[in-house]
Amino acid sequence: MQTDVLIVGAGPIGLTLALDLGRRGVKCLLIEQKPAPEFLPKMERCNARTMELFRRLGVADRIRQAGLASSVPMDVFIVLAMNEPPLLRLPYPSVDEARAQIAARNDGTMAREPYQLISQYTLEPLLKAEVERRPSVAVRYGCRFESLSQRPDGVSVVARTDEGNVVPIDAAYVVGCDGGGSTVRKQLGVKLRGEGDLLRLYQALYFCPQLYDRIPIGPGPGHGRHYHVADAQSTFLIMQDSTKHWTLHATVQNAADMSVQFERTIGVPIPYEMLYAGEWKQNLLLADRYRRGRVFLAGDSAHLVIPTGGLGMNTGIGDAVDLSWKLAAVLEGWGGPALLDSYEVERRQVGDRNVGASRYASLGRRKWRAQYRPEIRQMTREGQAAREALARVADVEQRKTNEMIGAELGYRYVGSPVIVDEPGGPEHLFREYVPTTWPGARLPHVWLSDGVSIHDRIGDGYTLLQLAARDGADSLPHAFGELGVPCTTLNLSSDAARQVYGYDLLLVRPDLHVVWRGNRPPDDPGEVARLVTGHVNPA
Ligand SMILES: Cc1cc2nc3c(=O)[nH]c(=O)nc-3n(C[C@H](O)[C@H](O)[C@H](O)COP(=O)(O)OP(=O)(O)OC[C@H]3O[C@@H](n4cnc5c(N)ncnc54)[C@H](O)[C@@H]3O)c2cc1C
């Protein structure tokens, strides 16, 4: 088989990469070792930035239709059991409420899209169906990647079908989206560094259709998504997208204990079925390299985080989108070599920061859990004191997991060979998002007077945003034209945008990151166009 891009692994990252490459008409082959998507719980929250990216891929609405209803709040509770008054409630808006907040503000602080809760086992088949509609993408389940060897002009891959048949594949580029145990990464000899096997937990999935309507705590039925139990087993109950399925995590001895743990957590007898129970381990690991030659790593094959903060899949979606347009540009012939070099520079620093953010959030969770005392359930003065102490610490520390807007929206690519860097730059904050157009940052979302977001006006090539008339501004798109690179000028008269963006001219690339800004055209527009399209060797 011959293809331009071979994607190994149809988890959310491989599927997203295939979707975006397919949208751009790139010929690619996606292989997956499993015979079909599995009904196994993992992630359940697409963060706001992921939903912005899914919007650009044209699938945000479908994801919302398949996911949790938009009216359900996302409150987080610390409880002794679900039939007792909570020790702490941290309120978080439903998608409807978040949407109203986004509509009401125009200061660049908001994402274009709210988050969406959707279980990984719902998301994967949805993305698979979308990918299969793209004519340039071939999808083969039941096909395992085994080995690769690189040549100057391509990569020779050996894969094997479930029936044991060898499938030789010849690809111009290979992307390993094959998860934490990545065979592609091992074939490249790339090591993961950091802290591995930090904690082993059991996770179980339950079908319990009555629970949602019978939770007695909270402002109304179906009022929260996460219930952390103040116990010695780090028990943690998560509502899945249907509201009929629930997952529980706990440090118990074996899978059978997960029934007892579920019954203890829900507190009242409700019929349920345990569909799955298995062990998983927490890691904080980052790959040394994201690329060797024509082979790239994306998603969990390159970074493994503790899901506190929801920076696992969400970080990987950022990898997929960063890589897809660059591969397309090189295959279309207009992208220079530094464009592919920039993938590792840009995304490995985000992986590194997000491993740190996840560590910070999980240490917070450990801090409040360390407040657990065996007497916490007793109706005594000591019991009351233990409950109050735990709630007080959790009120500070649990928020670190649930309030990560800076890590979600505020990442900025520093030192990229395809961004016209300005020295300095704002600090990276995990918990706070401060809108900026510093080169390398995501362009803040701003509403225009017609109620359309600037994000929605930006197409798939480069865009010069012109917020005030500037002589000679067309020299920049002209320079792109000479290189055969798509670049559109968007003339906007928007005080709000000018105020948030701080400059009259901004050059934005297909993934909505700012690559250059100024109040007059650059002295050498050709140099800027060559640099941002990867034709300037940083050496
Ligand atoms: C309990 C739990 C909760 C989580 N919650 C969140 C959350 O709320 N938010 C979040 O962002 N992240 C969360 N995560 C992390 C998230 O699930 C992962 O980051 C995400 O699945 C990574 O996607 P991926 O596509 O990179 O890898 P994977 O999902 O691991 O997919 C890799 C795919 O590659 C296939 N594969 C492997 N080897 C081969 C081979 N040799 N040949 C062919 N195919 C192969 C596998 O079968 C698999 O389908 C959670 C994880 C866990 C365990």
Image: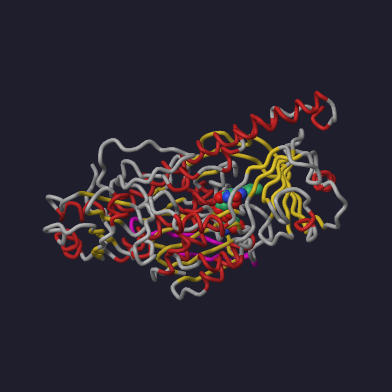
Residue visible at 40% across and 56% down in the picture:
323
Choose top left, top right, bottom left or bottom right for residue 384.
Answer: top right
Q: For this rendering, which residue is in front, 179 or 424?
A: 424
Q: Which color scheme is applied? A: secondary structure
For this orientation, the residue located farthest to the right is: 269
Does residue 170 appear in this view?
A: no
Range of residues picked out in magenta: 152-170
Magenta span includes 85: no
Position of the C terminus, as image quadrant, is top left
Magenta span main SS: strand
Q: Is residue 371 left or right of residue 103?
A: right
Q: Which residue is drawn at 35% across and 47% down?
A: 441
| Residue 331: percent from left, percent from top | 33, 64
Left or right: 92, with 86 as reference point? left
Q: Where is residue 466 in the image (x, y as percent from the top left)?
A: 23, 59
Asked if residue 65 is positioned above or below residue 223 in the image, the reply reads below
Tally of numbered tags? 0
368 or 301, which lies in front?
368
Q: In this picture, is 282 found above or below 329?
A: above
Residue 269 appears at what percent x and percent y?
Answer: 88, 52
Left or right of 237: which side holds 426? left
Q: Position of residue 156 (x, y in %)?
A: 44, 60
* Front residue of 12 and 85: 85
> Along the horizontal axis of the image, is 302 left or right of 163?
left
| Between 136 and 76, the one nearer to me in the picture | 76
Q: Can residue 368 be seen in this view?
A: yes
